Image (cartoon, rainbow, N blue to C red):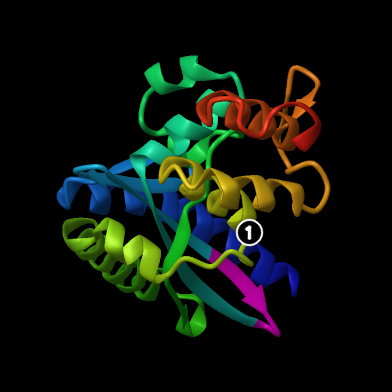
Amino acid sequence: MTREQQRKLRELNQYLSKLLKGIVKSYGLKKKDYMVWGKKGDMYFSLLVDIREKDGRCFCSSLERMKPLWMDDLFWDIMDMPENKKEPLSLRCIGAFAIYGMTCYECRQELPEWSPDALERCAEAYVRHFHDTVSSGTIEDYYSVFDSESYQGSIQDILVLIHNQEYQGARERIQSLEGNGQFQNKGIWFKEYAERYLSVCSGDMFSGHML
């Protein structure tokens, strides 16, 4: 990337932040830091609009994710962080201890000549699409795009199983986790927290030597 392209990329990113703020407001959505988010019923949605250079060309991309609200609540209960449930809803998309959700839409468009006008059209289209996703998205849509091999997929799989009281399946999934489960709080990893939580909510049926 040339120095001129680096300059244009910085300018576009600065413009994008201001641009999104206005567009998001017009659609009744929320923006926090670099993320756009929305809520409908018991579902939570997040949108990331990003600008990147590749092979001397400039692209604007969109990534939408969705998840049920109970997912973060359950995750925070397991991780001994129930106070997070009292925080603003924006924490569910920008917090270090938050579940990403499942990707439900991705798009990438080139910005001809690194143009601010092209960026404005692109961002408007992305936010409009996200608004439609928030308006129509359901828990069934979440399960339809569920991928246990995706980022945080194994953790979401465990959370779904526990939420549905499928404790045997949750126990097996916890034991098959690679590593300790990505998240750590107070020196304890997610895997150990999940085993403890499962032992309690399943009436100790998997406690003792079985865990």
In this rendering, is residue 107 above or below 31? below
Residue at the (43%, 30%) spot, across then down: 73
The C terminus: image quadrant: top right
Instruction: Looking at the picture, tell me which residue is in the foreground, 32 or 186.
Output: 186
- Residue 97 in percent (x, y) is at 59, 33
> In the rendered structure, which segment of residues is drawn in magenta?
51-56
Local secondary structure at mark 1 = loop
Q: In this view, does 38 lie to the left or right of 101?
A: left
Task: Verify whether residue 186 appears in magenta.
Answer: no
Residue at the (65%, 45%) spot, across then down: 171
In this rendering, is residue 60 above or below 44? below
**Residue 40 visible somewhere in the drawing:** yes
Quickly name the residue at label 1: 151
The N terminus: image quadrant: bottom right
**Badge 1 density bin: few <14, some 14–19, many ≥20, Cα 10 Å:** some
Task: Verify whether residue 53 appears in magenta.
Answer: yes
Q: In which quarter of the image is residue 189?
A: top right
- Residue 3 in percent (x, y) is at 74, 68
**Residue 127 visible somewhere in the drawing:** no
Instruction: Looking at the picture, tell me which residue is in the foreground, 54 or 193.
Output: 193
- Residue 59 in percent (x, y) is at 53, 76
What is the chief secondary structure element of the magenta stretch? strand
